Image: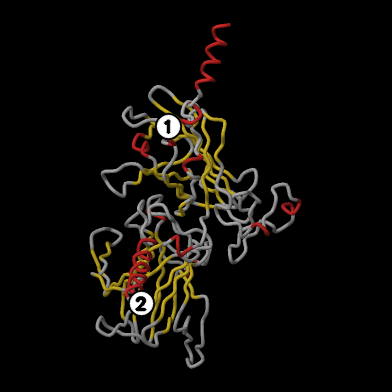
Amino acid sequence: MKLFILALCVIVIFSYASAYDPLDPNGNITIKWDVVSWTADGYVAVVTINNFQIFRHIMNPGWTLGWSWAKKEVIWSMVGAQTTEQGDCSKFKGNVPHCCKKTPIVVDLLPGVPYNQQFSNCCKGGVVAAWGQDPSAAISSFQVSIGQAGTSNKTVKLPMNFSLLAPGPGYTCGPAKIVPSTVFLTADKRRKTQALMTWNVTCTYSQFLARKNPSCCVSMSSFYNETITPCPSCACGCHNKKSCIMSDSKFLSMKGIHTPKKDNEPLLQCTHHMCPIRVHWHVKQNYNDYWRVKIAVTNFNYKMNYSLWTLAVQHPNLNNVTQVFSFDYKPILPYESINDTGMFYGMKYFNDLLMEAGPSGNVQSELLLRKDKDTFTFKQGWAYPRKVYFNGEECMLPPPDTYPFLPNSAPKNLLNFTPAFIFSLLALLAVM
């Protein structure tokens, strides 16, 4: 019994820990329901999806939101989104609801839908930016009219069992909780109105739940060592080895080979690491007061373009970033007293789209950092990042003992010469 309780505690603690990100401890997606009017048999609500994650966005094919009704509610109509299935509405005469399913699944509309189907912050194909990258684009919303439901604050039953795919698994949603009603400001900013009722649902992300293996890896090099430290072998798992394709394969010229599949199954270039994304960190130059690093991000997936990509890096010298040359940069301060983490992302209309694998499937930049005389060193791998995230997914780093080392920091056993060797060396010098 004690072993059972101990195991249960470990599972609970691990599940909470896996959803906690030390670089973004407060990051979450909050789904807010604002009841804006009552109807004869229900209510009209505005549903808003806010992405409060600093560096994890919702990329194509976008979010999918689901829940279960507490009673026998139906969706009469929607603006700015739609359910994927209507369900059985055969008992209705005349007006037929938009959806009669007990567990509706909702998706965003695509860009370019007719104006009368649009709603504010809708119709982006479910793509939502990260809060740290662009707060104005970190939101998606739609309007829904509910029937066969409560018609007052006391009779409304909150939806249950929320689920969120964004676009794949990894998010766990808590129960809906009633919160103080949202206050709205009119367009002329002279009058405030408020929702008749508001409830929130909070969803947190766990990479452990999302996938068994990492989705990116890190390689390293430096100007002071010819050795290039590659990504670890099978860093992202080698389950795709059988279906990968060589970079010079004739199949790459076939029509439709780069078209994404519905399940987003990747078509990877054959590599020893088998990762869709590789981040390369190169220590490029050393100056008296500064040092320079080159960062390159390479896409090895022939079926995926990464729009609105983000790269989060933890390194102690990011508290002294002097200049970033080809990326936008923003410091991340999860703990105000520590400034060692930053987010890089593409410049709009320049390199904010990481193309599919191939000649154009990479983005790169350089950054100049000012040295702190008390901490700066090239020894023991100090110049390399502690953590790297691409699109909110933590990348696998090489083992520390494989990092490029300084030539004068060779292992001690190489310097333990025998007395006979030293005597011979001195004799040789004497003859010369």
* Residue indicated by mark 1: 379
As rendered, which of 317 and 426 lies closer to the eye?
426
Question: For mark 1, does the 10 Å Cα neighbourhood hold few (<14), some (14 to 19), or many (20 or more) residues?
Answer: few
* Secondary structure beneath label 2: strand
Nearer to me, 364 or 86: 364
Quadrant position of residue 227:
top right
Up-down: is 205 above or below 425?
below
- x and y, in percent, of residue 52 in the image: 36, 58
Query: Could you tell me residue 28's position as x and y percent?
Result: 36, 61
Residue 339 visible here: yes
Tell me the tag on residue 44. 2
Of all residues, the one furthest to the right in this rendering is 250
- Answer with left or right where residue 190 lies relative to residue 206: left
> Which three-letter amino acid code belongs to the residue tagged 1?
Lys
Q: Residue at x 62, y 44 (%)?
A: 360
Q: Are marks 2 and 1 in contact (CB under 8 Å)?
A: no
Residue occupying the point 27% across, 71% down? 195
Q: Which mark is residue 336?
A: none
Answer above or below: position of 321 versus 6.
Answer: above
**Type of amino acid at the residue the image marks with label 2:** Val
Q: Disc 2 vs disc 1: which is toward the camera?
A: 1
Quadrant housing the C terminus = top right
Extreme residue in the front direction: 420
Sequence-wise, the earlier of marks 2 and 1 is: 2
Q: Quadrant of the N terminus?
A: bottom left
Residue 123 visible at all: no
Q: Position of residue 387 (x, y in %)?
A: 42, 46
Residue plotted at (24% across, 83% down): 154
